[in-house]
Image (cartoon, helix red, strand yellow):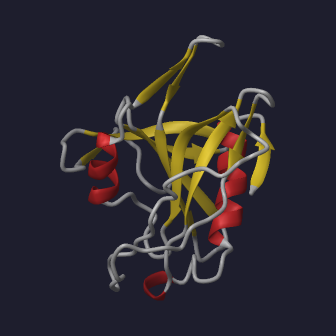
Amino acid sequence: MAGPYPTLEELAVSACEIMTREPGASNGTYGFEYCALNYFSKAENAYFLSYLSTFKRRLDSATTKTCSMPAALDAPTHPDAIIVGVDHTHPHNRAFSKPDLSAWIRWNPTRLYDKNTEKIWDRHMMLFYRERTGECRAYMFNTATRVVSALRERQWVPIGEVYSRDGDIRMFEGQGWIP
């Protein structure tokens, strides 16, 4: 759907804008989530965002929003694609939910190794939220290190770590969801 992006940070900035501007994606308790995959193409040496999904496995409530991640990537122009992350929006909350952080710790393997490039990929989940002021916020949960980071001034800044299998997060000193 979108790309190429030379860095994961640039993909996150663009994906946040694209995904949170979809109908209902920023409508608070009346909104709903969009999901997507992000992947890396070795041939293009760049990141890409997949098409968005609004499919659901269960009904939403005022406090719980869901979408189902695409089960596969259909990118015939990128047969060398490596899926490195999953992305979703929150229409009503800028923080990862406990299910977000607990369910994905089981996404195995949490790291990938490419023999040809000798690159190690940490898998991740990104979350996008649009503030009422219009500012788009991007967060990332690294499933290998279990660190949660916020994209601030186009750089990932660690803000907390997940310390339990249930998805409990401990924020780092002086850090939070909002800068």
Taking the image as drawn, is residue 75 in sight?
A: yes
State left or right for residue 85 relative to residue 39: left
Where is residue 22, by image quadrant? bottom right
Where is residue 78, by image quadrant? top right
State left or right for residue 3 relative to residue 71: right
Residue 91's x, y, as percent? 50, 75
Which residue is at a point 59% across and 77% down the rendered structure image? Answer: 132
State left or right for residue 78 relative to residue 110: right
| Quadrant that contains the N terminus | bottom right
Residue 163's x, y, as percent? 22, 38
Where is residue 46, by image quadrant? top right
Indicate whether 38 appears above or below 113. below
Residue sticking out furthest to the bottom: 30
State the count of labels: 0
Which residue is at a point 66% across and 54% down the rendered structure image? Answer: 50
Indicate whether 41 appears above or below 50. above
Taking the image as drawn, is residue 154 in sight?
A: no
Which residue is at a point 56% across and 67% down the rendered structure image? Answer: 53
Indicate whether 84 appears above or below 25. above
Residue 136's x, y, as percent? 63, 62
Residue 32's x, y, as percent? 49, 79
